Image (cartoon, rainbow, N blue to C red):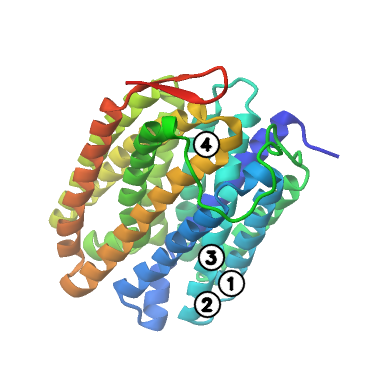
């Protein structure tokens, strides 16, 4: 039995949800680890940063794998690693387990995310929903990570473990569905036998990929502040101890991103990146203002504005790639975008963690946020000057300079 094209499309979206939920699942648990094991902000952000580091390695080695062996096989390998990572967190008895869990999460997401994104485009009968559904799936995954995590930490037993058991059940269900996806997609056999090799981007697509990568990097870097230290910011700087409140506040941005991807899904991709970059700069400025003034309303506003920016940047970034990358290079091209983005996320998280440990959280934000504002502005500029792209009949994009 095989899933229909429509069911395969929504299964690919569910894979993205599980991947992002897994990536953010420890976000509301970090303060509990800190209390239980006396961890510093540097250790907490190091645990967070192991994930993008491993994910980057996975993308370098396996980013184009599904272009050769098919989307289903690569997605299943990624989901298997994600399941191991979730189980490791659920059973964690010391900080070493957390690092191991993040390794498996990073490997799993690195394997699953690019083929799931490519499958969304290839199973999209309308040809118009893939980018917006991808953005919504990311938003849903991150929202579930913080809302479900916050609710279970605050009101359920076993606050350090239960959120991972709940996620494990969902991930197993999605894995079962993925077993029945079509084994291959068109053109996956066209490139010959796979072997580890650097992922490459066709030369004519490099300007487009640069704009896309900057767009996703910008939102991932700002998102790293919210995800890695967001719960701690809400608790220490904004003086709110309720984990569910913290989870809801952190989910505002992700939910807003999903709404934006629906409302503005017809906006041209380059325009979405230009506007999203400028709005992202405003979100970063509001974040540092909320910290310096210990203002919960400003933090909520920062999360809302970030969600608006994130929705546009995801929509524009993935839209450019999906519209212009040929099918037999699509997963590899998406992998390049994720590769750059996760490097930026890891550098941001580790840098902020080290600064927060040595100088304090507010001082660390005062240093990091101006850099993120500059990155957002550069993203808008690059998207504004990159040439228009017209898909060629051969499937290779042509750049009009």
Residue 88 numbered tag: 1
Vertical comparison of 16 with 131: above or below? below
Q: Nearer the viewer, mark 3 or mark 4?
A: 4
Assess whether mark 4 and mark 3 are in contact (beta carbons under 8 angstroms): no
Q: Earlier in the sequence, mark 2 or mark 3?
A: 2
Residue 398 x/y as whole percent: 44, 22
For residue 41, which quarter of the picture? Answer: bottom left
The Cα atoms of the two marked residues, 2 and 3, are separated by 23 Å
Assess whether mark 2 and mark 4 are in contact (beta carbons under 8 angstroms): no
Vertical comparison of 101 with 226: above or below? below
Give the SS element for disc 3. Answer: loop
The Cα atoms of the two marked residues, 1 and 3, are separated by 20 Å
The Cα atoms of the two marked residues, 4 and 2, are separated by 31 Å
Give the SS element for disc 2. Answer: helix
According to the picture, the residue beneath numbered tag 3 turns out to be: 156
Q: Earlier in the sequence, mark 4 or mark 1?
A: 1
66 and 75: which is toward the camera? 66
According to the picture, the residue beneath numbered tag 4 turns out to be: 134
The Cα atoms of the two marked residues, 4 and 1, are separated by 27 Å
């Amino acid at each position: 039995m095989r899933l229909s094209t429509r069911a395969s499309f929504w299964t690919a979206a569910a894979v993205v949800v599980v991947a992002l939920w897994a990536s953010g699942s420890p976000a509301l648990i970090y303060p509990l680890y800190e209390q239980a094991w006396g961890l510093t902000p540097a250790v907490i952000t190091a645990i967070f940063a192991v994930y993008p580091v491993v994910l980057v390695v996975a993308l370098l080695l396996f980013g184009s794998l599904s272009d050769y062996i098919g989307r289903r096989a690569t997605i299943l390998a990624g989901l298997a690693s994600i399941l191991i990572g979730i189980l490791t967190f659920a059973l964690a008895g010391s900080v070493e387990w957390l690092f191991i869990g993040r390794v498996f999460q990073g490997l799993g997401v690195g394997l699953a995310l690019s083929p799931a994104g490519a499958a969304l485009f290839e199973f999209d009968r309308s040809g118009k929903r893939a980018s917006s559904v991808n953005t919504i799936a990311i938003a849903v995954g991150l929202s579930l990570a913080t809302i479900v995590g916050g609710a279970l930490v605050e009101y359920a037993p076993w606050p350090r473990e239960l959120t991972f058991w709940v996620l494990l059940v969902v991930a197993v269900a999605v894995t079962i569905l993925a077993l029945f996806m079509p084994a291959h997609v068109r053109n996956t056999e066209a490139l010959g036998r796979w072997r580890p090799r650097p992922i490459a981007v066709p030369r004519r697509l490099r300007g487009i990929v640069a704009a896309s990568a900057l767009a996703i990097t910008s939102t991932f870097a700002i998102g790293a502040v919210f995800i890695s230290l967001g719960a701690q910011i809400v608790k220490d700087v904004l003086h709110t101890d309720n984990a569910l409140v913290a989870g809801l506040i952190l989910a505002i941005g992700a939910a807003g991103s999903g709404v934006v991807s629906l409302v503005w899904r017809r906006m041209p991709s380059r325009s979405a990146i230009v506007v999203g970059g400028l709005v992202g700069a405003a979100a970063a400025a509001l974040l540092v203002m909320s910290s310096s003034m210990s203002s919960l309303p400003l933090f909520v506003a920062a999360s809302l504005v970030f969600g608006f920016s994130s929705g546009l940047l995801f929509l524009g970034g993935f839209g450019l790639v999906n519209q212009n990358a040929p099918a037999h290079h699509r997963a590899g091209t998406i992998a390049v975008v994720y590769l750059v983005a996760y490097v930026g996320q890891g550098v941001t998280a580790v840098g902020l963690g080290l600064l927060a440990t040595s100088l304090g959280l507010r001082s660390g934000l005062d240093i990091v946020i101006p850099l993120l504002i500059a990155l957002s502005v550069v993203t808008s500029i690059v998207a504004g000057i990159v040439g228009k792209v017209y898909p060629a009949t051969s499937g290779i994009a042509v750049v009009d300079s």
